[in-house]
Amino acid sequence: MRRVSQPTACLSLAGLLCAMLVLAGCRPPATDTQEPIGSQVALRLTQTAAAPTSARPAPTVRPSETSIPTTTAIPTITPTPTISPTPSHTATATAVPRATVELGSLPHPPARFDGPSHFYFGSPTGGFIASSYRYGSVGPGQRFAPHHGVDYSAPAGADVVAVAPGTIYYAGSDLERLFGPQNDFYGNLVVLQLAQPWNGRALFALYGHLDQIFVQAGQAVAAGEVVGTVGATGVALGPHPHLEVRLEFPESYWDTRNPELWLTPASGYGTLAVRVTNAAGFYLPGVRVDFVCGDAAPRFMETYWYSGVNPDDVYGENAAMMNIPPGYCDFELTVAGQKVEYRDALVAAGTVSFVDIRVP
Ligand SMILES: [Zn+2]
């Protein structure tokens, strides 16, 4: 365990270590590289901070009219939503300490969803993705900078493998070469350039916090080939593999995408891409979305905080999760004390299912 005074890059082992540190009051101090999530005051997810009219998007399309090209592999997942504007009985007057976000400053969702799914990545390691600190989220208690990747629960020393065939772009430490918001952020890292670009754009997988590295720049690797082992180098609260997807700019912290939309889901499972916007079409950041799918297990995700993270070029989502059992899912979220429900979204195996939730 080291460098807890630095901005936190990742959680470990499903966030357990982190949660312990948080409980112990070991919160890293705010720095220039940490998003100002700890200093905000009130929940203001309404349109009060809307951009000037020139920056407003075109009038939104109702969910039932959403245009999804039939030529794409995106399933038709826009059943007429049951959006309940009934105020939640659980809403209280206690303000949740959330960011005051200029909604108009966030990227605007694309008007339509276009293109086939892009499951170019196999699993980088064993274990599962830590649910408490998914891409674009800020972790338990909202104490961390928005996450630019995902963390796995694999133990120290476990193998980390190439997610696809490709060529090693970089292998070594980031002590003197910048890949994150500061040097020594990822510690020992490997950046793999996939042999297969996406839409003509170079595609990269970044592995952070490694212990050992077994490859070197310029080396060709096969899918599944071991590139290193799980460690806790750089800014990490404990050993865990951190995986990022970078498009076009392998050394840019600001050009990531959500890995859960690039990782191939387990056989028989699908992936959810969710967009939560308000009536004016602005992304709503930091909204917890609880949902239940075919296996009746409770799941949740948190919409992106959009401080340096990006929606996918195909989906324009602000939350995503892989390995969802096929079948119908019901969603529930609360925005500014108002409960919103979205029912009967159909998830298909082997592809990305898109859910567009408009908060009235
Ligand atoms: Zn991480």
Image (cartoon, rainbow, N blue to C red):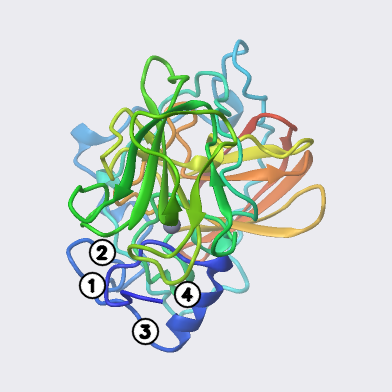
Q: CA distance from mark 4 to mark 2?
A: 16 Å
- Name the element at disc 2: loop
Q: Which residue is mark 1?
A: 30
- Residue 327's place in the image compared with 113, above or below, is below
Amino acid at circle 3: Cys
Disc 4: CA contacts within 10 A as few (<14), some (14-19) or many (>=20)? many
Observer-nearest of 158 and 185: 158
Q: Which residue is mark 4?
A: 18
**In this rendering, the label closer to the viewer, 3 or 1:** 3
Q: For the N terminus, give its image quadrant.
A: bottom left
Amino acid at circle 4: Cys
Query: Mark 4 or mark 1, which is nearer the start of the sequence?
Result: 4
Query: Mark 3 or mark 2, which is nearer the start of the sequence?
Result: 3
Q: Look at the numbered discs 4 and 2 and tell me whether their residues touch, using CB distance below 8 Å.
A: no
Q: CA distance from mark 1 to mark 4?
A: 16 Å
Observer-nearest of 345 and 18: 18
Observer-nearest of 120 and 254: 120
Q: Can residue 293 be seen at all in this image of the molecule?
A: yes
Disc 1: CA contacts within 10 A as few (<14), some (14-19) or many (>=20)? some
- Name the element at disc 1: loop
**In this rendering, the label closer to the viewer, 1 or 4:** 4
Amino acid at circle 1: Ala
Q: Which residue is mark 2?
A: 34
Q: Look at the numbered discs 1 and 4 and tell me whether their residues touch, using CB distance below 8 Å.
A: no
- Residue 49's place in the image compared with 190, above or below, is below
Q: Which residue is mark 3?
A: 26
